[in-house]
Structure formats: structure tokens, C-alpha cells
Image (cartoon, rainbow, N blue to C red):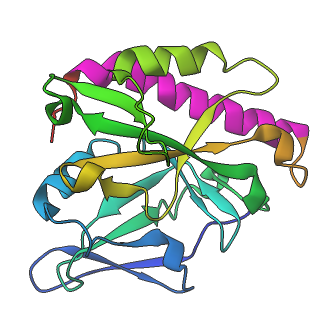
Amino acid sequence: MMSPLNTDIVSDEGGQMSALTSQQNADLVWDLEKIHQHQRAMTFVKQFENRFCVFSSSVRQLYTNYSIFFPEEADRQMVILPDPYAFHDTFSHLNPDAVQSTGLHVIPGNLIGKKGLYLVISHRDKNVKSVPIPFQEGIRQILRRSNTDDPFLPVLMKGDLREFNDQLPCLHLNRLRLKELSGLSSLERESIRTIVTDKLMSLYQESSALNIA
């Protein structure tokens, strides 16, 4: 593991916190211009702050300890800010090919006339319809695989905050394949498995208390 992105934090005149990265990493600045319900999207994604790890393909790093904020001076942008004092929480030298898109989305039940959160797979073939499952049940099924040789380890990347069917905000989940992390030691791979699994367990236990967009 290496030290994360160096970060200087300053306060603007309005007392808001702004982050100025001393090294440019565009993967940590998410453009929300295409999202119509901006405020809803902000509220929705903040619920998952630090609950899913974030991967940056450009610097090949996985951030497991970070904050989300929306700088007032940058209209419709979201910034992922790794904790500058927890360098051990950032994993480096990850093979970008180890992270795969899944089509799996976290959606608010409002989209399907239900309460709570749901998981649904978005198929490229519009004629194929998947059955949404309650979020907590979906996380439970993912956790069942956590100790297998090929666990399902969900991570976020730039662009994963979206609008489902151009309606309410949702989160797309990518999958990190441990077997593809050849550049890491077995200890580092197991550390990633443990961290992601622990976050999922906490999310599973607290999911019923999450607010809906």
C-alpha cells in the first residue's frame, strides 16, 4: 500500500470545506451534470459514504476511507476525498482489469412502487426484465460468497451515481475480482476482502434505516 492522494484542505469565506488536490485525479471528481434531480442524488449518495470502497483506474488505487462533498464553487460536481491521515486505508497497484461492470444497481423502491431500497440488474437487451430484490436480501446473498475463492466485492467508480430510467438516482456497482490482483500480496488481497466484507455487513445491518430518495 502507498500513501493516498496528497490533499490540502482549506475553508472558504462561507465556512464550507473545499478540497484542493495537489495531484490531479479526475476519477475522484464526479460530474453530475446529466442528473436532473440533483438534490435528490446528493442526498441519496451521501447515505453510502464510506459504505462502498471507491476505485480509481487512472492511479490504480482503492480508497476504503473517504468523505463525499459537494463544493459550492464547482456547480454539480461531487468530490471523493480520501482521508489524508489514514494512508494505510488506500491500496495501490491494482490492475484496472480486475474491476468489472456488473449492471447491478441500488435503486429506491419508489421506482417500482415499493418501499425501501432494492437491487436490480440492468440488461442491455431491453426485452430482458430482471426481478428487483430487496436490498437487504441482496446484500445477504453477496455476503454468502465473501469467503469463497471468487467473492463478489462491490466497489464504486466515477460515473456510478446515475438516474435509473431517467427518473430517480441510483448507484451502479462494479465488482472487484481478487484473483486478478496479481500485483498485490496475498495479505493485501485478504485485507481488501476483509474491509469490503466488513463494510457490507455494516450496510446489511443498517440498511433498513437508510432513507429513500
> Measured from the top left, where is residue 158 in percent x and y?
47, 64
In the orientation shown, which residue stands out farthest toward the front? Answer: 127
Residue 13: x and y, percent? 12, 86
Magenta region includes residue 33: no
- Highlighted range, magenta: 186-208
- State whether residue 15 is above or below residue 153: below
For image coordinates 19% across by 49% down, the residue present is 168
Point out residue 175 in the picture as x, y percentages from the top left corner. 62, 42
The residue sitting at 36% across, 37% down in the picture is: 106
Most common SS among magenta residues: helix
Would residue 49 be visible to someone looking at this image? Answer: no
Residue drawn 34% across the image and 59% down it: 68
Q: Is residue 151 visible?
A: yes
Looking at the image, which residue sits at the far left?
Answer: 14
The residue positioned 29% from the left and 37% from the top of the image is 107
Quadrant that contains the N terminus: bottom right
Residue 61 point in image, percent of width and height: 67, 62
* Figure quadrant of residue 113: top left
> Which quarter of the image is occupied by the C terminus?
top left
In this rendering, position of residue 42 left or right of residue 140: left
Q: Is residue 189 magenta?
A: yes
